[in-house]
Image (spheres, grey):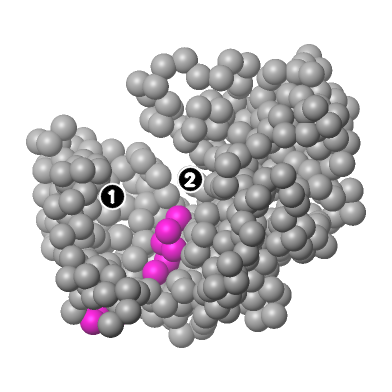
Amino acid sequence: MNHESEFAQWLNQQRGSQYELHSRYINPAFVKMIKTIGFDKNYVRGEGPYLWDADGVRYLDLLTGWGVFLLGRNHPKVRDTVRQVLDSYSPNLVRMECSLLAGLVAEALIQRMPEGLSRVFFTNSGTESVETAIKFSRCNTGRDKIVYCDHAFHGLTTGSLSINGAEFFRQRFGALLPGTSAIPFNDLPALERALAGKDVAAFILEPVQGKSCEVVKDGYLAEAQRLCKKAGTLLVVDEVQTGMGRTGKWFCFQHWPEVEPDIICIAKGLSGGMVPVGAVVTRPSIMDGVFNSMERCVVHSNTFGQNDLAMAAAYASIQVTEDEKLVENAAILGNYAMAKLAEIGRSCPFVTEVRGKGLMFGIDFARPKDSLKLRLAWDALHKLNYGVFGQMIVIPLLNRHKILTQVAGYHTEVIKFLPPITVNRADMDWFLSAMQSVLDDVQRFPGAAWDTVLGLAKSSLKVS
C-alpha cells in the first residue's frame, strides 16, 4: 500500500469527527450555528454542481463556497492540470526569477480585458486584491481617501473592512483605515458630491453587490467613470464574485461596453476551486508608479503570489471556461432561472423582488402588504430575531429538497444563489421546483415551516 492510499484510508476513518475537532480547536460558535440550523451534513464527496453526504444522498450546491466553485467541484481538467504541474517538480517560487506560468496567466487575463488594462499583480484572495487596489490607488494619486457604497462587501482584512458597507462586520475591531466614506449604491449625485473636493484616491464598487444582489443601473458605471476622471479619482471595480463569467460576460463591467475601469479586483472563481489565487488588473501607468525603480521593484509583494499550483489552476480555469462556452451558459441559464423565479415569486406575498445578473441572483423578502395573518406572523418572528425569515426558506431547501444555499448576509432578508456556471437546465428546474414548494409552505400559517423558524428564533435568543 502506497503512502497516498494510506493517507486517504486514514482520513476516511476520521470522517464525522470534524464537528468535535472544530468545537475544540477552531470555532465552536460556528459549529453551534450549523448544528442549530441542521447544516451539519457530513459531506464526503464533491463533483460538478453536486455534494454527497456519508449516506450517499446527493445535494445541489448553489452556495459554491461563496462563489469559489465557479466551475463546480473537482473539474477534471483543472485537477489534471494542477496534478501535472505538481508531478513536474517545477522550480516553484524561486523568487529571484520570473514564473513562466504567471506570465501565461497574466496574458490570458489581459486578452479578455479592454485594451488599456494590460498589467497584472497576483494575490492570494479577494480581500488581498482589494488591499492591493487601495495601495495602488493611493500611490498613483497621492491621496488617501476611498469612497465606497452602502451594503458593499470587499473583504474582512483591515483595509478591506474599512470599506465594508455592513457595520456588523466592523463592530469591536477598533479604529480602521482613516479617510473612507460610504455613499448610497446607484446614487450618482451622491458620488459627485463625494468627489467634489478632488481629494479621493479611488471609488470602489461591486457591479452586483454580494450582500444584496443589487445591480448597477444602466448608464451608472459610465457616468461614474466620467465623474472619476473629472475628479482625478481612480475607478476600481470589485469583480471578486462577479468575474470570470458568472454574470454572462467574462467580467460584469463588460455588460456596459463604454466602461473601462482603472483597476479590477479578481479572485474566487479564478482558482477553479482548487488553489487560492487572486489578481489585480490595471493600467501600466498605475503599476509603473508603484514599482518605479529597481530599488522598489518588490515594494508590494506576497509570499505565495504567483506560485505554480495557483497559476496552473488559474490557467486551466480560464481555458475550461472558454472551451466549454461557460460564459454563454451563465447568460442563458441565468436569464432562464431569474425569469422563472420571478414568476414563482409573484404568487408569494413575502417576495418583493428577484434580481441579479447571470448566475448570481437573489430573492428578496419583506413584510407582506395584503394578508393580515401573514403580517402578524412576520412581526412576531422579527420581534424575536431580525433576519431569521430566510432560514424558513434555506432549511427546507436543504433538508427536504437537498439544495444547499444560504442568506446573502447577516441581518438581511435576501437569499443569494451562486450556481456553478457548469450547471444545466435540469439542475435549474430541480431548484425552481423546490422553490415553488417552499414558497407555498411559508404562506401556511400556522404551519410546520413557521413552527421550525419560530423555534429557531427563540433558541438563538436564549443563546445570546
With 464 as the anchor, is 249 left or right in this view? right
Pinpoint residue 146: horizontal percent, then vertical percent: 67, 25
Name the residue rendered at 48%, 45% in the picture.
211
Q: Which residues are magenta?
A: 56-66
Name the residue rendered at 18%, 65% in the picture.
14
Rendered-image quadrant of the N terminus = bottom left
Going from the N terminus, do you reach mark 1 or mark 2 first?
2
**Amino acid at the residue labelled 1:** Phe
With 206 as the anchor, is 442 left or right in this view? left
User: Which residue occupies the extreme bottom position in the image?
Assistant: 426
Camera-side residue of 216 and 367 = 216
Q: Answer yes or no: do the residues labelled 1 and 2 have beta carbons within 8 Å?
A: no
Residue neighbourhood size for the residue with mark 1, other residues' Cα within 10 Å, grouped as few (<14), some (14–19), many (≥20) = many
The question of residue 358 being in magenta is answered with no
* Inter-mark Cα distance, 1 to 2: 16 Å
Name the residue rendered at 68%, 19% in the picture.
145
Residue for badge 2 = 211
Pinpoint residue 366: horizontal percent, then vertical percent: 38, 47
Pinpoint residue 87: horizontal percent, then vertical percent: 55, 73
